[in-house]
Image (cartoon, grey):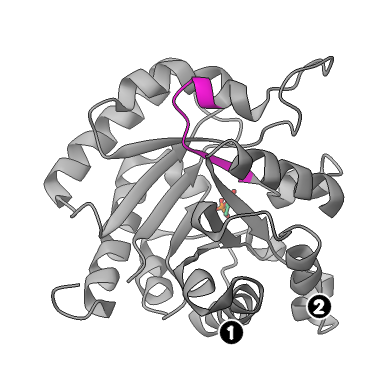
């Protein structure tokens, strides 16, 4: 059974004191939830300048630390950039790559995303690779072909499935308050699962977690998490509010327990 994962993408939000307060509330809330280590993982992805202090803030807790992006080169003349090696030095274990804001605002295309994904997994970190269609793509029935391209052009054979997490984030649902219905999300997750099995074989592809992201809130997390191929959430806005993020973690954990055969 796949371990669930709930990841918070803080984007460019929070001051350092606010971040410390949020982590402290998360730690307290997780103590009460008492999840088993193979049941669920919880990850926060703060802005890059906070990675060192947040590594201290989460130390000794169940909260893992991730970066929102990283450059594909290890070192070099790339003013303003931070490499995978650099974020790893802070204690990061995960890096988000290919978020739709990176694709659409910063113009990151599949070839550079392939380099970034390989840099992350090559350094031994876990990549959360984001895919998803725009509203225009969905309305033109291009959802599957867009996602197929985002997978085939980025996940080369040297990307280990053991270091890979997928996140399906329909662009039209990110930060808009519109969520894919659980059925719409499951349909795409199942499509992605088939592609991963095609790429990595049955055990490899079956083991990759596929998160859903796009306006996940406490009131829709349970119906999404109930779907067989939804293994957790990538949460933006609601991850900035401790009570909301904890409620999403709690709902995902409860559904994970319902899905697991007894004892697994
Ligand atoms: C995201 O930033 O990845 C995201 C899904 O944001 P939100 O939850 O706010 O839609």
Percent across and percent down for residue 208 are 50, 65
Which residue occupies 42% across, 80% down?
227
Comparing 219 with 229, the one in front is: 229
Which residue occupies 61% across, 82% down?
194
Q: Residue 74 colored magenta?
A: no
Label disc, if present, on residue 199 of the rendered structure: none
Which residue occupies 26% across, 63% down?
253
Q: Quadrant of the C terminus?
A: bottom left
Judge whether residue 181 can be spotted in this image.
no
Q: Residue 93 colored magenta?
A: yes
Label disc, if present, on residue 187 of the rendered structure: 1
User: Label 2: which residue?
Assistant: 145
Q: Is mark 1 within 8 Å of ligand 1?
A: no
Percent across and percent down for residue 238 are 45, 48
Q: For this view, does 63 lie left or right of residue 236?
A: left
**Secondary structure type for disc 2:** helix
Comparing 260 with 11, the one in front is: 260
**Secondary structure type for disc 1:** helix
Part of the protein shown in magenta: 88-96
Using the image, determine if residue 75 lies above or below residue 28: above
Using the image, determine if residue 104 lies above or below residue 215: above
Judge whether residue 138 can be spotted in this image.
yes
**Which of disc 2 and disc 1 is earlier in sequence?**
2
- The residues tagged by marks 1 and 2 sit, at their Cα atoms, a distance apart of 14 Å
């Amino acid at each position: 059974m796949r371990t669930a994962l709930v990841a918070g993408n803080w984007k460019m939000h929070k001051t350092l004191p606010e971040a410390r307060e949020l982590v402290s509330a998360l730690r307290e809330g997780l103590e009460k939830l008492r999840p088993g280590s193979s049941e669920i993982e919880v990850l926060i992805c703060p802005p890059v300048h906070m990675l060192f202090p947040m590594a201290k803030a989460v130390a000794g807790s169940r909260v893992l630390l991730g970066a929102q992006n990283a450059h594909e080169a290890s070192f070099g003349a790339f003013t303003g950039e931070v490499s995978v090696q650099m974020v790893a030095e802070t204690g990061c274990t995960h890096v988000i790559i290919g978020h739709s804001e990176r694709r659409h605002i910063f113009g990151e295309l599949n070839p550079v995303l392939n380099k970034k994904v390989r840099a992350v997994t090559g350094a031994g970190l876990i990549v959360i690779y984001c895919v998803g269609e725009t509203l225009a793509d969905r309305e033109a029935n291009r959802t599957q072909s867009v996602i197929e391209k985002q997978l085939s052009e980025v996940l080369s054979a040297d990307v280990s499935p053991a270091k890979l997490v997928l996140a399906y984030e329909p662009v039209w649902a990110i930060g808009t308050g519109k969520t894919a219905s659980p059925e719409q999300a499951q349909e795409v997750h199942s499509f992605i699962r088939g592609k991963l099995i095609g790429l990595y074989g049955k055990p490899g592809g079956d083991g990759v977690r596929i998160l859903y992201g796009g306006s996940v809130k406490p009131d829709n997390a349970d119906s999404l998490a109930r779907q067989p191929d939804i293994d957790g959430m990538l949460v933006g806005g609601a991850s900035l509010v401790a009570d909301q993020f904890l409620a999403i973690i709690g709902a995902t954990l409860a559904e994970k327990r319902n899905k697991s055969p007894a004892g697994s």
